[in-house]
Amino acid sequence: MILNLLKQTIRKTFNTVGIEVHRFVPENSSSARLLSALRKFEIDVVVDIGANNGQFAKELRAGGFKHQIISFEPLTSAHAKLIEASKYDPDWEIHSRCAIGDQIGEIEINIASNSVSSSILPMLSEHSNAAPQSIYLGSEKVEITTVDKAVLPYLLEKNAPLLKIDTQGYEWHVLNGATLTLPKVKGILMELSLVPLYEGQHLWLECIARLNAEGFTLWSLEPAFIDPLTGRTLQWDGLFFRQ
């Protein structure tokens, strides 16, 4: 807590004299490659669906991304941390707590012990065996809405939005609720599972084919989840752009 306050004080002090402070992002890291792609396609807003505590947005800021970030998060505890993390960033907006999918109403989300693996879908043993710290500890109810209802209004004056979808197997449902929004989107960063990790999820080849049909080209793949016992890659982060 004290360290975080110290960092915030130092950053604010430098900002008052026109100096921006960013955490160093090594060249040729996955973050650096993503930031290079965002610059190439002139992305002017990032929609962070499944923001958790704000790790992704912090990485963008550390790499110098200066445009608007809009974050969505369904978990009560993570949403509170998200609000705290964004406190001193006027271009980082936190939407009210909700899940994003293909319906409007209320739904139950499973809470993982590591928080980041929380999902609306039941977790399969392939996931929990590879990451025992991700087992479910409980659940909570949350409002659920769609990209078209919650996200599209943010994008009306934007030229090149990027959707980042990190919803632990629920990506297909998010796309189902984005039919009006996708034609407006320039890029998509989405989890792609090579094997079933959550019950009922769609796998990587189906997702790539769907995005290709929507006019997106696969730009890059980054390993995201590897079984430490077998070395098998279970999940990629797939980056797609309209060209």
Image (tube, grey):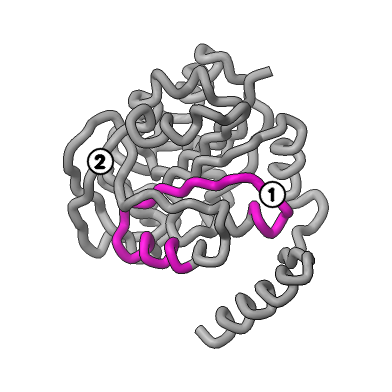
Mark 2: give few (<14), some (14-19) or many (20+) Cα within 10 Å.
some
Q: Quadrant of the C terminus?
A: top right
- Front: mark 2 or 1: 1
Q: Is residue 108 left or right of residue 91?
A: left
Query: Which of these two is toward me, 170 or 43?
Result: 43
- Name the residue furthest bottom: 2
10 relative to 115, above or below:
below
Q: Residue at x 61, y 27 (%)?
A: 159
Relative side of 92 to 33, left or right: left
Q: How many marks?
A: 2
Q: Amino acid at mark 1?
A: Phe
Badge 1: residue crowd in 10 Å (few <14, some 14–19, many ≥20): many
Q: Is residue 205 left or right of residue 80?
A: right
Q: CA distance from mark 2 to mark 1?
A: 29 Å
Q: Is residue 123 part of the magenta span, yes or no?
A: no
- 211 lies above or below 152: above
> Closest to the observer: 138 or 48?
48
Q: Residue 65's mark?
A: 1
Instruction: Give the residue displayed 50% in from the left and 66% down from the top.
Output: 87
